[in-house]
Image (spheres, coloured by chain):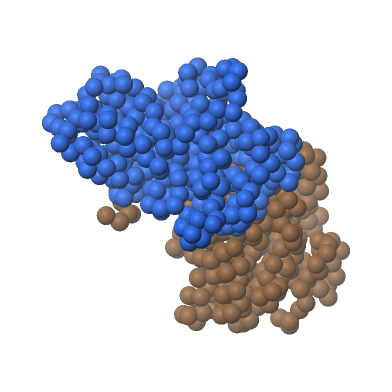
Amino acid sequence: MAPRKQSGSTSRKTTRGSTATKSGLEGGITDFSKDQELDSYREMLLIRRFEEKAGQLYGMGFIGGFCHLYIGQEAVVVGMQMALKPGDEVITGYRDHGHMLATGMEARGVMAELTGRRGGYSKGKGGSMHMFSKEKHFYGGHGIVGAQVSLGTGLAFANRYRENDNVSLTYFGDGAANQGQVYESFNMAALWKLPVVYIIENNRYAMGTSTARASAQADFSLRGKSFGIPGYQVDGMDVRAVHAAGMEAVEHCRSGKGPLILEMLTYRYRGHSMSDPAKYRSKDEVQKMRSERDPIEQVKARILEKKYASEDELKQVDKKIRDIVADSADFAQSDPEPDVSELYTDILL
Amino acid sequence: MSGSTTRMTMIEAIRTAHDLAMERDDKVVVFGEDVGYFGGVFRCTAGLQKKYGSHRCFDAPINESGIVGAAIGMSTYGLKPVVEIQFADYVYPAYDQIVSEAARMRHRSGGQFTCPMVIRMPTGGGIFGGQTHSQSPEALFTHVSGLKVVVPSSPYDAKGLLLSAIDDPDPVIFLEPKRLYNGPFDGHHDRPVTPWKNHPLGEVPDGYETIPLGKAAIRREGSEVTILAYGTMVYVAEAAAKETGIDAEIIDLRTLLPLDIEAITESVKKTGRCVVIHEATRTSGFGAELSATVQEACFYHLEAPVLRVTGWDTPYPHAQEWAYFPGPDRVGRALREVMED
Ligand SMILES: Cc1ncc(C[n+]2csc(CCOP(=O)(O)OP(=O)(O)O)c2C)c(N)n1
Ligand SMILES: [Mg+2]
């Protein structure tokens, strides 16, 4: 990838009507192959249906405490995952169910962690915000806003140290981007040329506070500028745009050029967590996003238009996904709770 | 004083205290994450921005260190910032500012500067919050000399103590047991909680009435054993006393620093027995301090070792919350045990 200028400082970059000369990082979109369209459709739909089910189980009282749904943001994690190779690490905050499913973690294990059961990824100890999978190189699931950014930087350091060619994908939100440790991390990553892609999922809100009310510079792609970290805004509702930017970003890191920032312009449809009625924004705003920019509907429309699959075939896909999700929900309700003796395991004595 | 009162929740009591303090003194400014426009995730600051303007009640970015650090600067100048840390579990990024700056300003400036500020934060478990939304970090603050540490257990106390805290010339850590926001939860998670409107301590004086820092309250008079508690555990202690039939004297410390040693020793000298309880983990918890204080001051009056009932020495779990939470059964067992000696 040739060195490029950073994205504009004033306006949100629109990827609509992009031309073939633009790179992924500059908002270019490469058409997906049939397989890519169908794969991304399936992956995004799995996350959507999983989250809908989690919301239901929460409403029924099977999931306690905190539960942050990823609905609306599916294209971000699916597009990025499609740009990875096995071994690349993923780390994120507490809105993590989608990231886990995208890395290939089992729906059963994730759902059972939500309900606090033995078969959950953290044996019921972590809950919605705290899950991990060594096998899938998923490093959590972190409840403290911004903490994972330094951890992801450390993963990148380990990659460089081991010369293993892996890249650390470090996700965080627009709100998290204001934590001081983010900038400590940026400096270290740039100083030591670490292979880390910082993915800022800008869904316009941090709980009830919009970016305008909390950020002096709400173009988050610029946040690495003083460290010389290139940053780009990406249409996070279009999985192809995410994928194209992801491919270049990961390549940039792998080739030893140091960190890179991708600001994903995205949106969460639901409240911050299950207990948030989201009164701080209008229903129209949400509705407009849903009806005009939905990441899954975009792919679906293309699949049908290009006749990659028929309505009926997509219904079959949907049914398979519903089966996976229903199975995970059954498991999450029937699997026993951890034994009380588990209170005193995985600790220091 | 008019003497009139209003029934309210702890959330409303906290909001009212902010309101009165802001009305009285324009040096009081209130900020934190989601505090201004949204009114706080627990609604403790709802309506303040509308009433006093966004220069006095406002949102801060998610940067606890910056929030507390800025508040320290404001307070050394003479403002009286009241900041909210959304959950006590999020205070750690600000811990350096609290310990190295706020707590030491008075001492290292030879008394020229103090930090008249309040750092409020919801604390404690019982809401299925898991390890990042349930902690009780009070001992991390009591261990630092230079801070005052307050834990109210009712709407009545929350209002009076918060007013005192805001008016105090030094930094006050104000820990609000979130499980008590809407009612006196006694650890019986399978039973409905009485709302504050049906509890005598839900009746709060309307005016500017303060409760002094450093004064404990006796919640139940008794002769057989003294229970030292604060926050949610006050009601757990009440339930345990009732269920065991042991005539316990329950002391609600209300302020951990300064500690009301007089009230403690007076009671323990009378009963000769003492059980210390808290939700926080056991090792180096505030209970250790209480236990040591009691044996130093009341050794010759004690008829049994001082017992502690606390959270286990583990992170707060997601599953098995009620096996972790020191409920009335565990407190009751300690009461029986201490009576055996
Ligand atoms: C250190 C810390 N401060 C505050 C919180 C409370 N909190 C949890 S999520 C959140 C908003 C974060 O917003 P953003 O980073 O934009 O992520 P999003 O929820 O939009 O995915 C806040 C304030 C926390 N968990 N940790
Ligand atoms: Mg956000």
Q: Nearer the viewer, residue B85 or B151?
A: B151
* Residue B139 appears in the rendering: yes
* Residue A268 appears in the rendering: no
Of the 4 image quadrants, the one containing the N terminus of chain B is top right
Q: Nearer the viewer, residue B334 or B158?
A: B158
How many numbered dots are placed on residues in this image?
A: 0
A40 vs B5, left or right, is: right
Of the 4 image quadrants, the one containing the C terminus of chain B is top left
Q: Nearer the viewer, residue A234 or B122?
A: B122
Residue sitting at 81 percent across and 55 percent down? A305
Relative image position of residue A120 (x, y in whole percent): 43, 48
A323 vs B213, left or right, is: right
Relative image position of residue A326 (x, y in whole percent): 54, 41
Residue sitting at 59 percent across and 63 percent down? A180
Quadrant position of residue A176: bottom right
B198 vs B264, left or right, is: right
Residue sitting at 54 percent across and 70 percent down? A153
**Please, is residue A208 above or below residue B215 in the view?**
below
In the orientation shown, which residue stands out farthest toward the left? B341
**Please, is residue B66 above or below residue B310 in the view?**
below
Q: Nearer the viewer, residue B138 or A22?
A: B138
Quadrant position of residue A263: bottom right
Residue sitting at 53 percent across and 31 percent down? B210
Chain with blue colouring: B
The color chain A is rendered in: brown
Relative image position of residue A28 (x, y in whole percent): 79, 69
Relative image position of residue A132 (x, y in whole percent): 46, 57
